Image (cartoon, rainbow, N blue to C red):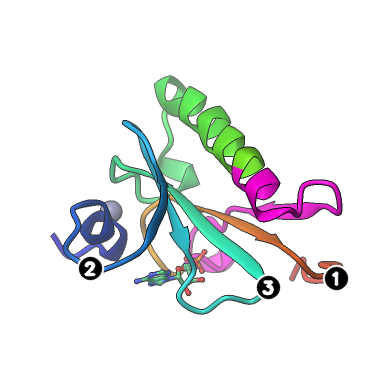
């Protein structure tokens, strides 16, 4: 298993897990670009958004719900935050395991590429 995020799910890379349930895990980004920078992933290895099946769509709602709850916990819910999913190399995806970035704690404005 050479996927970094699968290794985090399996506990093979020491990472502080800040949220987990049966289907998903969240942890802080190792190279944060904002005061709050959390990565939310499905436990299942889905390479990217482009590989998501219709049956897997509810997982995305579940991940958004986790992000919203973590944003509240981080105290950034009222001020606002951004959820980002990079898809494929052209979309800026580096780790080929579907993940969502939760970014906040500073003004995030003109970084859409
Ligand atoms: P992306 O460019 O959307 O694929 O983002 C991958 C993110 O994963 C980057 O922001 C990395 O800093 C982050 N990352 C890579 N390895 C780790 C790790 N071991 N623990 C936490 N975050 C990581
Ligand atoms: Zn994986």
The residue carrying mark 3 is 34
Answer above or below: position of 2 versus 85: below
Q: Residue furthest left?
A: 1
State the CA–CA distance, disc 2 to disc 3.
23 Å
Q: Nearer the viewer, residue 100 or 77?
A: 77
Q: Which residues are magenta?
A: 70-93
Q: Earlier in the sequence, mark 2 or mark 3?
A: 2
Answer above or below: position of 90 versus 79: below
For label 3, count other residues whose C-alpha is less than 10 Å away and answer few (under 14), some (14-19) or many (20+): some
Mark 2 CB lies closer than 8 A to ligand 1: yes
Position of 111 with respect to 44 (left or right) is right
For label 1, count other residues whose C-alpha is less than 10 Å away and answer few (under 14), some (14-19) or many (20+): few
Q: Earlier in the sequence, mark 2 or mark 1?
A: 2
Q: Quadrant of the C terminus?
A: bottom right
The residue carrying mark 1 is 110
Which dot marks residue 82? none
Residue drawn at (39%, 65%), measured in percent from left and top?
95
């Amino acid at each position: 298993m050479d996927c970094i995020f699968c290794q985090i799910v399996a506990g093979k890379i020491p990472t502080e897990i800040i949220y987990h349930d049966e289907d998903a895990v969240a942890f802080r980004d190792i190279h944060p670009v904002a005061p709050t920078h959390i990565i939310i992933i499905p436990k299942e290895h889905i390479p990217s958004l482009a590989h998501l099946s219709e049956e897997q769509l509810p997982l995305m709602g579940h991940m958004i719900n986790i992000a919203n709850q973590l944003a509240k916990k981080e105290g950034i819910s009222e001020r606002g935050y951004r959820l980002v999913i990079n898809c494929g190399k052209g979309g800026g995806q580096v780790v080929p395991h579907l993940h969502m970035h939760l970014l906040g704690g500073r003004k995030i404005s003109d970084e859409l590429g």
